[in-house]
Image (cartoon, rainbow, N blue to C red):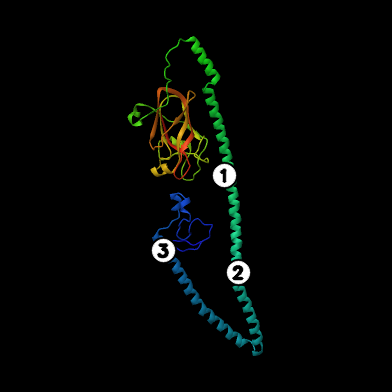
Amino acid sequence: MKCDRCGKEFPDTELYCDRCGKAVFPEYMDESDIWAYYKTDEELAEILKAEQEETVNVEIASQKEKPEESKVDSEKKEVVSEEIPEEDIWEEDFFDEEEEEEEDEEEKIPLNPQKKKEKRKISFLILLILLLCLGIGIALGMKRMKDLDRQEKEYYEKLHKEVVHQDTPTEETQEEMEENTNQDAPQQEETPKQEYFQFVDPDEIDFSQYQKIVPVSTEQNSIKQSDTYDYSAQSAVDGDSSTSWQENESGTGETTGIQLNFDGNHKVRYIVLYLGNWRSDQLWEYNARPQNMTIQVGDSQTKEVEFSNEKKKFCLSFDEPLEASYISMYITSAYQGSRWDDNGISEVEVYE
């Protein structure tokens, strides 16, 4: 492969040019990865200049060594010719020529292009085998991680279903309760059911009058792995909207979610949500955002909430404060991102 910036030839297995640091596949990398080894034009000019000077010095040194070697050889020949009789000169010259030819052949062997190709093939095969072993190890590790994530996800789904099943009465019990109330109580006008989860404008609320609840721990049933950013649920309650929890499942993250655990029961009055990736407007459009979420406030209230496809703060208000020691929220559907399917929540604020 040839670098289109500096013209350096390098193996196809490299991700960066070892001379100028240019990335080979920038479309598959983050911005920090693309510029990790990139050298400026000034640095590249210095590298090229140093390489030219080094080649010139090598040529000069080789030219200087040749005449010195010829002088030494001539002196040796004169001394040998003086010491050895004329009759033995021919025989010694014959054997010397054979030895020189053998030495020349030995010296020429490493420079043979065929052997160079064979060595390159062997080194390439060794490198290929090492890469294959590395790929197998990575694949097995990823499979193991996915199995663990799947088991954790199944556990949380089972736990979530059990909690919802305990809180919501069955159809038979509902019918019995309705029949008892209809028989015992006189007929009255139906009163509208109280709606606990209501959207309000967060800009119209003075949150300084309320106490912010800081979770003591967080949980998630899926997390995106990264060496640069922390995508755990803790990033959704660190007070910084540029950090976020992000899931790592195929698709747009349905059934994934987080749970915030408090130090005890608190009377929850407001929940403010920053949905999607708020690190920048561009990343918010690139990534997926929750459309519907199942939000559970303690053991008392669970509801499916739908959100609009807007980059804004969503504030859920309660007519009466709800006592809760935790809040969980799970994605049931999502808005697709323009580039990636990664879904997440940037920040969650809870007030009492």
Amino acid type indicated by mark 3? Glu
Write the residue at 45% across / 30% down.
305
In the image, taking residue 274 as reference, residue 172 lies left or right, namely: right
In percent of width and height, residue 151 lies at: 58, 36
Residue 283 is situated, as x and y percent measured from the top left of the image, at 42, 43
69 versus 326 height, above or below: below
Dividing the image into 4 quarters, which one contains the C terminus? top left
Residue 62, image x, y percentages: 50, 74
Identify the secondary structure beneath mark 1: helix
Residue at the disc numbered 2: 114
Kind of residue at badge 1: Met
* x then y, percent, for residue 88: 66, 87
Task: Name the N-terminal-most of marks 3 and 2.
Answer: 3
The residue identified by callout 3 is: 46
Q: What residue type is labelled 2?
A: Gln
Mark closer to the observer (3, 1): 1
Number of numbered discs visible in the structure rendering: 3
Side of 47 relative to 255 (left or right): left
Residue occupied by mark 1: 142
